[in-house]
Image (tube, helix red, strand yellow):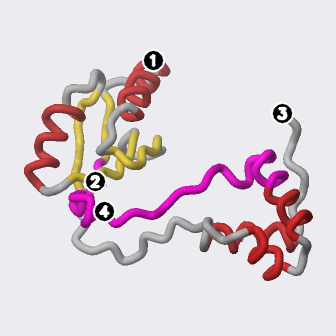
Amino acid sequence: MTAPSPIDRTDRRILALLQADGRLATVDLAERIGLSPTATTERIKRLTREGFITGFGARLDAAKLGRSFLVFVEVLLDKTTPDVFDRFSDAVRRTPDVIECHMVAGGFDYLLKVRVADMAAYRRFLGEALWTLAGVRETRTYTVMEEVKADQGLPV
């Protein structure tokens, strides 16, 4: 894969507009940035090909889908070897309640973002999914009382 080409101000404007509204029609996008629809389409294709745009999707309401209980979980593994990291990562990728997983440096190994229906569902998740994973030595849970900012956008 070749290195991505530098992006200019117009590319950044395209990224910002699409990030705000991924359903924006190419004609409308082109009008907002001052290019033809063909030139806009070519830029979007290049930005996608070069990995600046990784996909499109809808933002869903967690509460309406029965997943209003949000927790962050620190996970400490009993060993920090490549095979333990790989097994843990593979297992987490197959666990739908985990919506984010980050390997971190510091006093624990992974930080998970988990969405479930309620405390009882979280308790089941701990017992049936997380604590059963090989290598998990300890967990600490932080229950979210209020989501102050949950913006998924990146500054462009």
Mark 3 vs mark 1, foreground winner is 3
Q: Amino acid at mark 2?
A: Arg
Looking at the image, which residue is at 24% across and 34% down?
130
Question: Marks 3 and 2, how far apart in space?
Answer: 35 Å
Q: Position of residue 105 (x, y in %)?
A: 48, 44
Which one is earlier in the sequence, the residue at label 2 or at label 4? 4
Which one is earlier in the sequence, the residue at label 3 or at label 2? 3
Q: Amino acid at mark 4?
A: Ala
Q: For label 2, count other residues whose C-alpha is less than 10 Å away and answer few (under 14), some (14-19) or many (20+).
A: many
What residue did someone put label 4 on?
Answer: 62
Looking at the image, which residue is at 85% across and 66% down?
40
What residue did someone put label 1 on?
Answer: 83
Per the rendering, the mark at residue 115 is 2
Residue 29 or residue 131, whichever sits in front = 29
Stretch of the chain drawn in magenta: 45-73
What residue did someone put label 3 on?
Answer: 1
Q: Secondary structure at mark 4?
A: loop
Image quadrant containing the N terminus: top right
Q: Amino acid at mark 3?
A: Met
